[in-house]
Image (cartoon, rainbow, N blue to C red):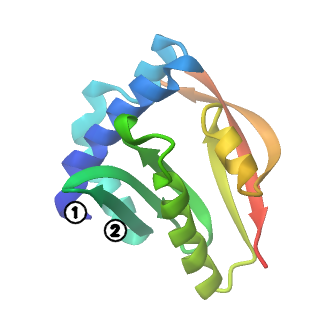
Amino acid sequence: MDSDIKEVISLFYETVHAINARDYSSAQLDAWASKDDQLHKEQLWTESLRNNISYVAHINGTMVGFVDMSHSGYLDRLYVHKDFQRQGVASSLVNMVEFEANKLALTRLSTDASITAKPFFLNRGYQIMQTQNVERNGVTLVNFKMMKQLT
């Protein structure tokens, strides 16, 4: 994953600004995925992704998505390339971390889902625990604390 970090961050930035634009204002998108923050994010995410269970999906040599989950079952990041939405990429990535969660004998997974991602997680059996107002760079964004019980 370390060698992919620049591409991961680029995919994150482009996805947030293209896909989440239907649910968030441009000020919210800039606070969430600031171009100015990329170098700092490279260092922070390299460490985080290294410590988490992380997967990157490629189709014909193009990075189309990535996911990571902590060893305690927090699904931290799930992003799919803006040109590969609704093609099963997110489902495949989440299937992989849910499989790992079962191997770790975790009883539940949690995530903080955006307005945009909420329907995806609801369809996968996650439940909304609470609506949250998160502040980033002085801008408030709404997201949802969601949880899924594993069998």
Label 1 packing within 10 angstroms: few (<14), some (14-19), many (20+): few
**Residue 112 point in image, percent of width and height:** 64, 46
Q: Residue 11's mark?
A: none
The residue drawn where x is 26% and y is 26% is 36
**Residue 103 point in image, percent of width and height:** 59, 87
- What is the quadrant of the N terminus in the image? bottom left
In the displayed structure, would residue 32 be above or below residue 40?
above
Tags 1 and 2 in contact by the CB under 8 Å rule?
A: yes
- The front one of 127 and 130 is 127
The residue drawn where x is 65% and y is 45% is 120
In the displayed structure, would residue 19 be above or below residue 53?
above
- SS at mark 1 in the image: helix
In the displayed structure, would residue 88 be above or below residue 149?
above
Q: Which residue is mark 2?
A: 50
Q: In this image, 69 relative to 36: left or right? A: right
Q: Quadrant of residue 23?
A: top right
The residue drawn where x is 43% and y is 30% is 16
Gap between marks 1 and 2 measured at Cα: 7 Å
**Residue 3 point in image, percent of width and height:** 17, 61
The residue drawn where x is 34% and y is 68% is 50
Kind of residue sitting beneath label 1: Asp
Question: How many numbered circles are shown?
Answer: 2
Q: Residue 2's mark?
A: 1
**Residue 88 point in image, percent of width and height:** 50, 53
In the displayed structure, would residue 149 be above or below residue 86?
below
Which tag, 1 or 2, sits closer to the chain's start? Answer: 1
- SS at mark 2 in the image: helix
Q: Find the residue positioned furthest to the top.
A: 26
Q: In this image, 23 relative to 28: left or right? A: right
